[in-house]
Amino acid sequence: MNDSSPSRLDLLLFARRVVVQQARAALAQLDRWITDEQRREAERLRGEEMRPAPPEWLIERGLDKRNLVAVHTGDCWKVTKSGRCVDASRAQALDALRRQVPACTHCRPDTALGFLE
C-alpha cells in the first residue's frame, strides 16, 4: 500500500465532515424557509386584523348607478366581489325596502331586518 494514500480512518473522518457541512447548510436553508413562512403568516394575520369589518347591509346599484337593484346583507355571497354595491346602514336598508327595492332572494335581508310588508 502506498504511504501517500489516506487511511480508511482519514476517509471516514473526511466523509463525516462533509456530511456535517451539508447538514448545516440544509438546516440553514430550512431555518430561512421557516423564518420566511413565519413572516408571511404574521403579515397575513396583521392584514386580517387591519381589515375593516364588513358592512352590515349592502345596496346593489344598476349599471346607471341611480337604479337600485337589490338590498343584501353585508356577507351575501352573491355580491361580495361586485363593484356595484355600496355600504348601507340599517336605516338605509329599511328605507330601500320600503321604497320597493327588492330584497336579495339568497341572503334575505328583509327577514334579517324584520321587515314585513
Image: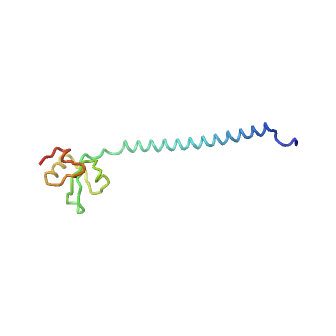
Residue drawn 48% across the image and 41% down it: 38
Q: Position of residue 10 (x, y in %)?
A: 78, 38
Q: In this view, which residue lies farthest toward the bottom?
A: 64
| Front residue (pair 9, 81) | 9
Residue drawn 75% across the image and 37% down it: 13
Q: Is residue 106 left or right of residue 27?
A: left
**Colour scheme:** rainbow
Q: Is residue 14 left or right of residue 87?
A: right
Quadrant in which the N terminus appears: top right
Q: Position of residue 5 (x, y in %)?
A: 84, 43
Q: Position of residue 49 (x, y in %)?
A: 37, 42
Q: Position of residue 24 (x, y in %)?
A: 63, 40
| Front residue (pair 1, 98) | 1
Q: In this view, which residue lies farthest toward the left?
A: 117
What is the total number of numbered labels drawn onto the structure image?
A: 0
Q: In this view, which residue lies farthest toward the front?
A: 105
